[in-house]
Image (tube, helix red, strand yellow):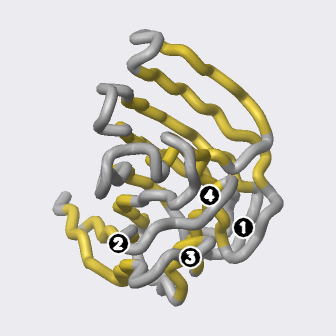
Amino acid sequence: MAITYYKLISNTLLSNNTSIEISGIPATFDDLVVFGSLRATANNTMLVQNIKLNNNLSNYNRSEIYAQDSAFGAESNVTTSLERTVGRIPGSIASANTFNSFEMFIPKYSGSQNKIIHIRLSTSNNSSAAWDEWFTILHWDDTSAISTIAFETSTGSIASGSTLSVYGVKYT
């Protein structure tokens, strides 16, 4: 079986904004992969990054977050909740131009079943060797095809230069 990735849409913020969004995702592929790199403007080293699908803030049945950071070295945060948290974004206290890096995989995004979303995220403040690794599984109880994906911070804005790119995946 061959796997082919098709770049569908990319969005790079040209100015600070409260969120970054990709819309108009066609429902013609088997799976979706989203690659991103975000930075916040708030006066924090790291801020929580949240996801919104189809402009919907509800229907998140649960999320499972496994996080590890440089302060603890081992798995330091394991939670199960109804939140939309997917990881942290470097803020203005981090070294200039420090962005996080994440990959999100959404199997059967256009199907008529509830969605399970896998997210892997890494971030660093690049000034004190502090880093985070987040592995998140979101359970989204919605049977509609995903056509819009947005990320937002818990406070402040997402910085200019932050990028999202969406790829459709076909199996042949």
The amino acid sitting under disc 1 is Thr
Q: Nearer the viewer, residue 25 or 43?
A: 43
* Residue type at the position of mark 2: Gly
Verify CB contact (< 8 Å) between mark 3 and mark 4. Answer: no
x, y (%) of residue 114?
69, 57
Circle 4: element type: strand
- The residue where tag 1 is placed is 143
Camera-near label (2 vs 1) is 2
Q: Is residue 93 above or below residue 148?
A: above
Identify the residue shown where x is 68% and y is 53%.
154
Q: Say which of marks 1 and 4 sits in front.
A: 4
Residue occupied by mark 2:
161
Rounded to the nearest angstrom, the CA distance separating label 1 from label 3 is 29 Å
Residue 165 visible (yes or no): no
Which quarter of the rendering shows the C terminus?
bottom left
- Residue at position x 67%, y 75% from top? 54
* Secondary structure state at the residue bearing disc 3: loop
Kind of residue at disc 4: Thr
In x, y percent, where is residue 118? 49, 46
Q: Is residue 32 left or right of residue 79?
A: left
User: How many residues crowd around disc 1 within 10 Å: few (fewer than 14), some, or many (20 or more)?
Assistant: few
Q: CA distance from mark 1 to mark 4?
A: 26 Å
Residue 131 falls in image quadrant: top left
**96 sits left or right of 137 in the view:** left
Type of amino acid under label 3:
Asn
Label 4, on which residue? Answer: 153
First in sequence: mark 2 vs mark 4: 4
Q: Earlier in the sequence, mark 2 or mark 1?
A: 1
Which of the two discs, 1 and 4, labels the residue nearer the N terminus?
A: 1
Which residue is located at x 63 percent, y 61 percent?
156
- How packed mark 3 is, by other alpha carbons closer than 10 Å (few <14, some 14-19, many 20 or more), is some
